[in-house]
Amino acid sequence: MKVLLFGATGMVGRGVLRECLLDPAVEVVLSVGRSATGVRSGKLEEVVLPDLTNLAPVEDRLRGFDACFFCLGVSSAGMSEAEYRRTTYDLTIAVARTLAPLSPTMTFVYVSGAGTDSSEHGRTMWARVKGQTENALLRLPFKAAYMFRPGIIQPQHGITSKTRAYRIGYAVVRPFLPVIKALFPNAVTTSERVGRAMVRVAREGAPTPFLDTREINRLGT
């Protein structure tokens, strides 16, 4: 299986990259991002682009992939809806529209979030925009598209978030994770399980396009 990975330098993307490189079913990983990953592997190839909304210069390298794992994302804190939409909806859909004709048998996996609003009309801004993004992806002519909606993601294997607020949040929550897992087992997953679940979904499919934490944990075990 040949995998395209967007966002490999972020917390979720780094976890997904690790699992792709460990999985014998994955032959090649092409990371596309604004900066290099710093990871060395015979499986890993990298494309560094300053503007990910314009993939035209590297289109020839994006053909023939079996899966795209789209792990790019930003916090909506302090952002207007227009700003958040540009960095969430506009970027994701620009990439997806480029990839669909280049790799028509591709499975596209998008990291969304628990609480995403599929109606696109709810009161929570980020949930509306994520819902719009999901719906637009599902209308594109991929072989299949899956929306991962995790709740709390526990980073593992030395992985940390680049977002300061997230790092602080994880530091605060970490001592309570065993209790949270015991009380709410379907609220917490790990970076390892997310990565494993993505590879499995790309290889085997899933019964629904919307995968919550419970399903991510089942597939990523």
Image (tube, helix red, strand yellow):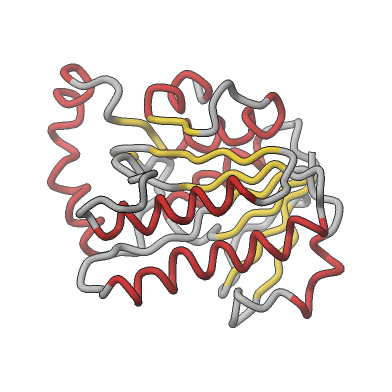
User: Residue 18: x percent and y percent?
Assistant: 57, 44
User: Residue 1: x percent and y percent?
Assistant: 79, 38
The number of numbered discs placed on residues in the rendered structure image is 0
**Residue in the image at 84% along x and 58% along y:** 63
User: Residue 212: x percent and y percent?
Assistant: 40, 30
Depth check, front residue: 64 or 82? 82
Image quarter of residue 59:
bottom right
**Residue in the image at 50% along x and 48% along y:** 135
Image quarter of residue 16:
top right
Q: Is residue 154 left or right of residue 15?
A: left
**Residue in the image at 37% along x and 37% along y:** 150
Q: Is residue 73 left or right of residue 98?
A: left
**Residue in the image at 19% along x and 39% along y:** 174
Depth check, front residue: 180 or 187? 187
Q: Is residue 47 above or below residue 27?
A: below
User: Residue 64: x percent and y percent?
Assistant: 86, 51
